[in-house]
Image (cartoon, helix red, strand yellow):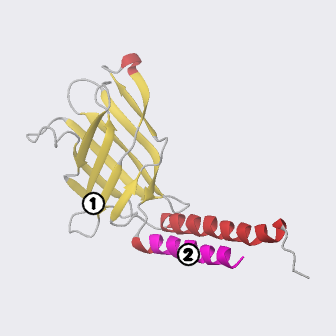
Amino acid sequence: MKPRIDSRSWLAPRRTANGAVVLGVHLALSWPACAALQSGVYWTPPGTTVEERGDRVSGGIRIVPFSATLTFDLDAAQPSLTAVIPNAVLEGGDPFALTVRSSSGVRLTDGTYRFEGDYLRELYPAGTQYMFDWQFSTAGDGSIAWNGITGWAGGHIWQVTISGVTLVPEPGTLTLIWAGIVSLLAGRVLRRA
């Protein structure tokens, strides 16, 4: 008599393998988020918004979508930051791509990093009065929080407020290797089933 394999016995190893893949990828991608700010690349999560206020902003205030890729060099004598913002705003206008570089950076006694500079320096190398002052700190849950302002330092009001934006670290090499190992192991379980 041939052994009978019913569909339920085939699904159990598949569910276990699928669960292992999901758990492994989740752990691999969330593990670095529980560390203090380090040199490297971070992103703003999808759905992030900021508040823009000003004399030239329609209605005086608006909430706008905001995304950025931030690269930190915290090991240098003076820490530095480069932010690539594909949807930067200025004075209530349409979003535009902008790269922002810090002119100064410092680690404060509480572990917070503070970066300042000219918001539009890449577009106007001679300098402008559009300045930024951004701080990055480790929150109580271990995530990295971005707070600060970008604003006009001249004769009218314009300011973008960044409040409590949680940064997502770029998956490192070890994280990607771990995710690959979990996927391979899950594939072996499926082949044996």
Check if mark 1's residue and mark 2's residue have beta carbons within 8 Å.
no
Q: Which mark is residue 8?
A: none
Q: Which mark is residue 106?
A: 1
Is 92 left or right of 177, judged from the image as shown?
Answer: left
Range of magenta residues? 175-193
Rendered residue at 34%/64% (across/down)? 40
Mark 1 → mark 2, Cα distance in angstroms: 43 Å
Quadrant in the picture for residue 188: bottom right
**Where in the figure is residue 82, as x and y percent of width and height?**
26, 53
Q: Where is mark 2, residue-wise?
A: 184
| Residue 176 included in the magenta stretch of the image | yes
Rendered residue at 52%/70% (across/down)? 179
Which amino acid type is marked by label 1? Val
The residue closer to the viewer here, 114 or 40, is: 40
- Depicted 73 relative to depicted 157: above or below: below
- Depicted 146 relative to depicted 175: above or below: above
Instruction: Specify the quadrant that holds the N terminus.
Output: bottom right
Instruction: Specify the quadrant that holds the C terminus.
Output: bottom right
The residue closer to the viewer here, 43 or 72, is: 43
